[in-house]
Image (cartoon, rainbow, N blue to C red):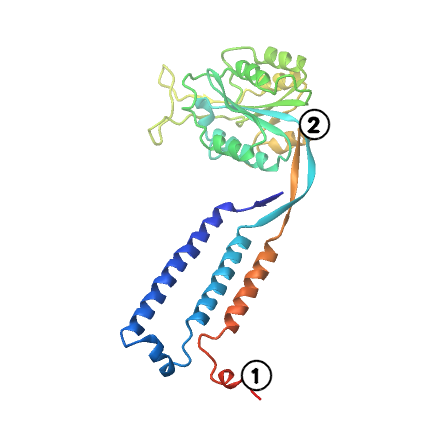
């Protein structure tokens, strides 16, 4: 089997065609200019060192060298064997709270931004595990289906904000239920959910949802985003202004640690409280890595060997030949006649 690692570079071969056309045109002009002085046959004795053939050979050598250099740079590869690659890991769903309370700044720069940065760093540490992302406020949505495409995970993560879910609130239970349904169907892999929220649950029973997930063999971990003293929630579009209740008092969002501890207990998982120095995802990633890893994917790849060096060597050979061919006839070699006695 044969292929090029960078086939797009083969378009550079068009340059050789353009140079050939240019060379033919210039040689034609040169011959025409000589013909204007008189009969070329009669002018030969006046130009004994002139040689059109040598110039043509030098050009041919140079074009062959350029062609082989382009082929070498394009990365020619020859398939040598088939290689079976097996990926073993776990499936992990991140459930991220995007309600307005996550904009509180007791954790800098905000609860939500700190969580996003921690998730991004965690994704960089994954290898063969699958990861998915669910966002929630009043409703829950799958932001990223379960995948091993970590670049896509970071891309989707960067676009998350509090406006991504139209209904405000904190429906942790609905988010856990959705995450539990979002794993690979009928896969016998180890599964875990990590819920990242401030825990201000107002709409459903997150503890029962965690129990339902655990009955399906899914471990539920929780991370509490927020400090004990809490913080006001910034008003959107108003710098230095904070959200207020119906009586005009500034709303202070506080971490509901008890709820998150109960959710983690019901899901046979671990609860971690975030801080300004550590969100806690690394600790939970260690927990995930201790889970039994099963075969997630098995593929057969063709193992290709790089052969670009041979093409570059041939190109270098033609460059040396072009350098050795003189553009004009050598006046000393012209006097040599091996057939003369």
Q: Quadrant of the N terminus?
A: top right
Tag 2, which secondary structure?
strand
Q: Mark 2 packing: few (<14 Cα in 10 Å), some, or many (20+)?
A: some
Circle 2 is placed at which residue position?
295
Circle 1 is placed at which residue position?
339
Q: How many marks?
A: 2
Whether residue 118 is visible:
no
Residue 279 is situated, as x and y percent measured from the top left of the image, at 57, 32
Residue situated in front as seen by the camera: 68 or 297: 68
Residue 239 is situated, as x and y percent measured from the top left of the image, at 34, 32
Residue situated in front as seen by the camera: 204 or 190: 190
Q: Label 2, label 1: how many angstroms apart (C-alpha)?
A: 79 Å
The image quarter containing residue 187 is top right
Mark 2 or 1, nearer chain start: 2
Q: Identify the residue shown where x is 58% and y is 44%.
A: 3
**Is 175 rendered above or below residue 239?**
above
């Amino acid at each position: 089997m044969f292929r090029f690692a960078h086939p797009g570079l083969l378009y550079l071969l068009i340059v050789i065609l353009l140079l050939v056309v240019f060379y033919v045109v210039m040689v034609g002009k040169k011959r025409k200019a000589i013909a204007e002085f008189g009969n070329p046959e009669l002018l030969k004795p006046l130009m004994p060192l002139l040689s059109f053939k040598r110039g043509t050979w030098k050009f041919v050598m140079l074009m062959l060298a350029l062609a082989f250099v382009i082929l070498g740079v394009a990365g020619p590869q020859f398939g040598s064997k088939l290689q079976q690659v097996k990926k073993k890991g776990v499936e992990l769903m991140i459930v991220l709270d995007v309600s307005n309370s996550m904009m509180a700044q007791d954790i800098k720069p905000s609860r939500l931004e700190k969580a996003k940065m921690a998730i991004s760093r965690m994704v960089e540490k994954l290898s063969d595990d699958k990861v998915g992302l669910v966002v929630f406020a009043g409703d829950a949505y799958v932001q990223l289906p379960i995948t091993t495409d970590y670049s896509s995970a970071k891309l989707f993560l960067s676009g998350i904000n509090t406006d991504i879910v139209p209904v405000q609130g904190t429906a942790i239970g609905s988010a856990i239920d959705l995450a539990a349904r979002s794993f690979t169907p009928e896969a016998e892999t180890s599964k875990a959910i990590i819920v990242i929220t401030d825990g201000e649950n107002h709409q459903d029973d997150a503890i029962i949802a965690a129990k339902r997930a655990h009955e399906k063999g899914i471990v539920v971990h929780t991370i509490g985003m927020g400090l004990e003293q809490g913080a006001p929630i910034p008003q959107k579009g108003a710098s230095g202004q904070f959200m207020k209740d119906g009586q005009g008092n500034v709303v202070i969002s506080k971490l509901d640690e008890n709820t998150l501890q109960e959710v983690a207990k019901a899901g046979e998982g671990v609860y971690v409280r975030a801080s300004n120095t550590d969100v806690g995802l690394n600790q939970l990633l260690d927990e995930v890595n201790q889970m039994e890893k099963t075969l997630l994917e098995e593929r057969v790849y063709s193992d290709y060997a790089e052969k670009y060096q041979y093409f570059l060597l041939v190109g270098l050979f033609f460059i040396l030949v072009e350098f050795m061919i003189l553009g004009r006839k050598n006046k000393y070699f012209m006097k040599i006649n091996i057939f003369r006695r």
